[in-house]
Image (cartoon, grey):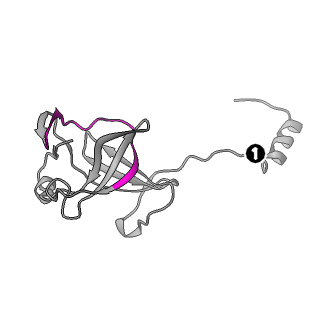
């Protein structure tokens, strides 16, 4: 415990209106019905538990199941690679419509993920047979 004089405490208390103390948001889950997109929202993908979280800056969030990459090497759409989804910080910097409606689902929507400013082959998208993937207990099924 720090001891300060009464006069110093008085100065601190009177100056407190001018002090900017960052307040850390308190995470608390809300329902999907309460959710509305806001500026500054973040997506966190827990690739160990296959759970996604959309988080508002004030700490309100929703959680939902996701599917992440197979934990193996695959050969798919002309490439051979390790399909395990890398754990890293990504930024969505572009949106695309893809013509492959199996890989990218009926809409073809694809949110391209960038890492350290560089475009990657990774993205967030639908899949034509995603009901089957989400129906399985183990959801490490995507090709990346």
Residue 57: percent from left, percent from top: 51, 53
Q: Residue at left 44%, top 38%?
A: 117
**Residue at left 29%, top 35%?**
86
20 horizontally vs 132: left or right: right
**From what the image shows, is residue 80 above or below residue 29?**
above
- For the record, the magenta segment spans 77-95
Secondary structure of the residue carrying numbered label 1: loop
The image quarter in which residue 75 lies: top left
Q: Nearer the viewer, residue 110 or 144?
A: 110
**Left or right relative to 2: residue 115:** left
- Residue 139 place in picture, x, y as percent: 16, 47
Residue 11 picture quarter: top right
Question: What residue sits 83% from the left and 39% below the top?
Answer: 9
Question: Which quarter of the image is occupied by the C terminus?
Answer: top left
Task: Write down the residue under mark 1.
Answer: 19
Left or right, 1 with reference to 27:
right
Could you tell me residue 84's position as x and y percent? 21, 36
Residue 83 is a magenta residue: yes
Q: Nearer the viewer, residue 23 or 113?
A: 113
Mark 1: few/some/many CA within 10 Å (<14, 14-19, 20+)? few
């Amino acid at each position: 415990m720090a001891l300060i004089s009464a006069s110093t405490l008085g100065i601190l208390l009177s100056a407190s209106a001018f002090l900017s103390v960052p307040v850390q948001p308190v995470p608390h889950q809300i329902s999907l019905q309460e959710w509305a997109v806001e500026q500054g929202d973040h997506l966190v993908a827990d690739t160990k538990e296959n759970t996604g979280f959309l988080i508002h800056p004030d700490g309100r969030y929703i959680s939902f199941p996701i599917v992440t990459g197979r934990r193996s090497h695959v050969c798919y759409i002309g490439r051979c690679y390790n399909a395990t989804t890398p754990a890293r910080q990504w930024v969505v910097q572009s949106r695309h419509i893809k013509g492959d409606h199996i890989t990218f689902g009926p809409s073809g929507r694809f949110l391209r993920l960038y890492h350290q400013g560089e475009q990657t082959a990774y993205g967030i998208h639908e899949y034509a047979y995603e009901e089957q993937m989400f129906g399985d207990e183990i959801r490490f099924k995507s090709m990346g």
